[in-house]
Image (cartoon, rainbow, N blue to C red):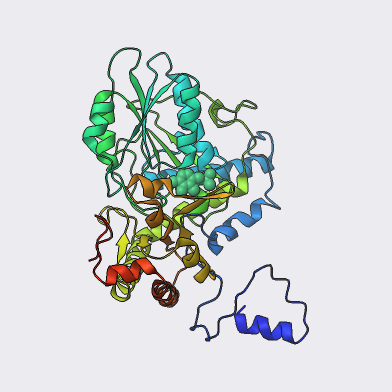
Amino acid sequence: MSIDSNISQNGAGSDMSNTGVVISHSATPLPEGVHLPLYMDNHATTPMDPRVLEAMMPYFTGKFGNAASRNHQFGWEAESAVETARTQIAKLIGATAKELIFTSGATESNNLALKGIAEMYRERGNHIITQVTEHKAVLDTCKKLEKQGFRVTYLPVQADGLIDLDDLRRAIVTEGPEKTILVSIMFANNEIGVIQPIAEIGKICHEKGVIFHTDAVQAVGKIPVDVQAMNIDVLSLTAHKIYGPKGVGALYVRRRNPRVQITEQINGGGHERGMRSGTLNVPGIVGLGAACEICMNEMEAEGKRELELRNYLKAKLEAAIDYVHVNGNMEHHLPGNLNMSFVYVEGESLLMGINDIAVSSGSACTSATLEPSYVLKALGLGDDVAHSSIRFGLGRFNTKAEVDYVADKLIDVVLKLRELSPLYEMVKEGIDLTKIEWAAH
Ligand SMILES: *Cc1c(COP(=O)(O)O)cnc(C)c1O
């Protein structure tokens, strides 16, 4: 429904006001094809692809069987759908169907991977390596493992967000009770879009006989992922970041060269070869499979389109606004991600100014306080710069018209706020504020 039809229907006294969506009215008419609020936050979650929903629908009603029911048609039908999904997912990451375990999402996959490996290989050693810009599902799990006696090394990142492979090599312990049992490094970062050198990390891990897990939530379906070529042993993924449903994910666990074992964290009926009990979410799994198959077929074209839109957005903002700073290495970068700091602008005012656009800011709401993003801080950004940062997450359904709207709106807001900024005034007058690293370009 267009904004206009919504308004006129409301005006005519129909009860269409209950759409549940708050629509802000802008003074100027919206460009063709642009609807508010506008979604450009596809790293947080994605809308479901209608083709995925279509594939799922029968499994809510007519084909409602329990995949573990071995003695009737309903069960067989559900089981066969689950096995089809397993194959679809496996194909996208170069795995075999048997190496996939279904979970409730990547938070659970990460927990199962880290806790499951730590518990299984406890006799072998107690050292785990990860890095500072991981998702909280990895960091908080590591914190928990530390409390249980494991030693965790959190590798720093360089100013561009990439880890230094020499840091990794140095951190690996190959002998003694402090032997490294696991390295967990994310494939692509959810805030800054930086892609870590996964194949090199995998090679190092295999040479040293250490299990390599990667949180590949932001990479799977967006860029090529191959667990064989990249020596990945364990990999987490989730459906809702690739146009599938929320609440379903998977964990890939390597079966040979080497065979990786994990201790189950949920006990029950012995589903998923005992590694994750619980009745399978059949419609969700079917959706995850369908989402993977669509990505498999369309990833290349979609990546190219998103990259063009991303570069267009970046160029447009940089042309109109001075003192902008792009965060993260732009060479090793997800096509749909752009993280930019608009310095000399107060973060909260910036967000208020674009409140009909759904993007993420460099501030994380932890309870009542507004904390600067730990990822941006790890790159060396100051609190103010982090707060004035915006993460744009372009996705399958974003259009050029939307990018233009977002860019124009942002330029307008930033320029207006800069007029009110004493800091910006000083910089314009040539006053050297400090030895600020993100100098103008
Ligand atoms: C979204 C996300 C997760 C969490 O996935 P859920 O399925 O929502 O639990 C984990 N890691 C990364 C990098 C993510 O972006």
* Residue closest to the eye, 399 or 27: 27
What is the x, y in percent for residue 240? 52, 52
What is the x, y in percent for residue 152? 39, 26
* Residue closest to the eye, 95 or 388: 388
Decide: is 26 above or below 191.
below
Q: Residue at x 62, y 43 (%)?
A: 281
| Label total for image | 0
**Residue 293 in sight from this viewpoint:** yes
What is the x, y in percent for residue 117? 44, 25
Q: Residue at x 46, y 55 (%)?
A: 43
Q: Residue at x 50, y 62 (%)?
A: 348
* Residue closest to the eye, 370 or 293: 370
Q: Quadrant location of residue 4?
A: bottom right
Residue 324 falls left or right of residue 115 = left
What is the x, y in percent for residue 286? 56, 49
Quadrant of image for the C terminus: bottom left
Q: Residue at x 68, y 43 (%)?
A: 65
Residue 67 falls left or right of residue 383 = right
Quadrant of image for the N terminus: bottom right
Decide: is 268 above or below 405.
above
Residue 228 falls left or right of residue 142 = left
**Residue 354 in sight from this viewpoint:** no
